[in-house]
Image (spheres, rainbow, N blue to C red):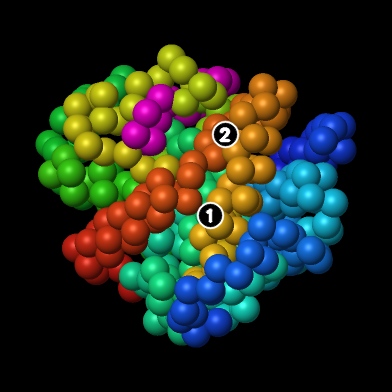
Amino acid sequence: MNRSAATICGAALVLMAGSFAAGAAHAQAPSTGSEQAYPTKAIRMIIALAPGGGVDTTGRFLALKLNEAWGQPVVTENRPGAGGTIAAELVARAAPDGYTLLMTSAGITITPSLLKLSYDPLKDLLPVTMAVVSPGVLVVHPSLPVKNVKELIAFARARPGELFFSSSGQGSAQHLTVELFSQMTGIKMTHVPYKGTAPSILDLVAGRVALTVASVISTRPMFTAGKLRALAVVGPKRTTALPEYPTIAESGVPGFGVENWYALFLPGGTNKAIAGRIHEVVARVLSDPATSKLLLGQGLDAVGSSPDEFAKVYADEIRTWAKVVKAVGVQVN
């Protein structure tokens, strides 16, 4: 999503929210009954990405809804950098009392394989909920003589290394998604990293590369105008944002599915009853038809998964990306 579009979306979220009525690895906090009164003071939400993007606007929207539900301020604070690890470390080291939240993206499952972390991502962070998914789509330049995923695989297989794909950077979710696709289909393509999603898409439109994977919101104007061709969505199931497009799994690659989600975490060791209370509010907000419609307009699918459901996804994705990074030999300078 480019910054201007994200800013407009963020403003819509804030207006919508206002219109609704109402440390090191921590030991598990003992149940003293305090979680039943939670919250009794302001909550700090650390947002792992810069202002204006989807993670930021979604986080601020949820902060407003939590404030409405509980009557306690939820103060947002952006701490971008190092692939989201600066924010994650801050929350991992915070007191496990429920008063520090992390809002971040699925990139948090990739960084453990790329960077030396000062925290344990599985022990020092407690998954709360996958709030939304920003569906991704596989797009190609119109000059490429393929109309679907099966044709792309056959075309690439006959030309190992000749197709160039772009991404927002070495080791990015875009990069590794295409690498996973290549591994699962037995094809070989050449990666061209860019400094951000926007330039990677612009060079695809210009025909300097053959394909990429990016969000629906950032590519839809291009493929609806015929400047790109969308082949399939990359998630495990179809998205309401593009219901007519099949998944890659449906298109001949069984088991493939990658989601770029935005999610909430607490410090590890926080009482799970608190995670449950936060999830309860977020799930209720996201199930509201007006919220779902607003998010859909931004290319986002509302989820609101339970802490246990999300914890499994989180752990599984850390393992998946570790295997991909190792197989590809990705190095980040």
Query: Would residue 186 appear left or right of 2 to someone viewing this image?
Result: left
Residue for point 40% across, 20% down: 245
What type is the residue that disc 1 sits on?
A: Val
Give the farthest residue toward the top: 244
Is 232 inside the magenta-drawn segment?
Answer: yes
Camera-side residue: 202 or 44? 44
Residue for point 25% across, 24% down: 251
Helix or strand or loop: what does disc 1 sit on? Answer: strand
Q: Main secondary structure of the magenta part?
A: loop
Camera-side residue: 281 or 19? 281
Above or below, 324 relative to 261? below
What type is the residue that disc 2 sits on?
A: Ala
Is 87 inside the magenta-drawn segment?
Answer: no
Cα distance between the residues tagged 1 and 2: 15 Å
Give the farthest residue toward the front: 33
Helix or strand or loop: what does disc 2 sit on? Answer: strand
Q: Which mark is residue 302?
A: 2
Q: Which mark is residue 257?
A: none
Residue 145 coordinates in the image, percent (x, y): 29, 24
Residue 316 coordinates in the image, percent (x, y): 30, 54
Above or below, 187 relative to 314? above
Camera-side residue: 134 or 272? 272
Q: Which mark is residue 128?
A: 1
Where does the C terminus fall, quadrant-wise?
Answer: bottom left
The magenta segment is: 224-238
Residue 99 coordinates in the image, percent (x, y): 69, 68
Residue for point 26% across, 24% down: 250
Residue for point 55% across, 20% down: 224
Where does the N terminus fall, quadrant-wise?
Answer: top right
Mark 1 or mark 2: name the one nearer the start of the chain: 1
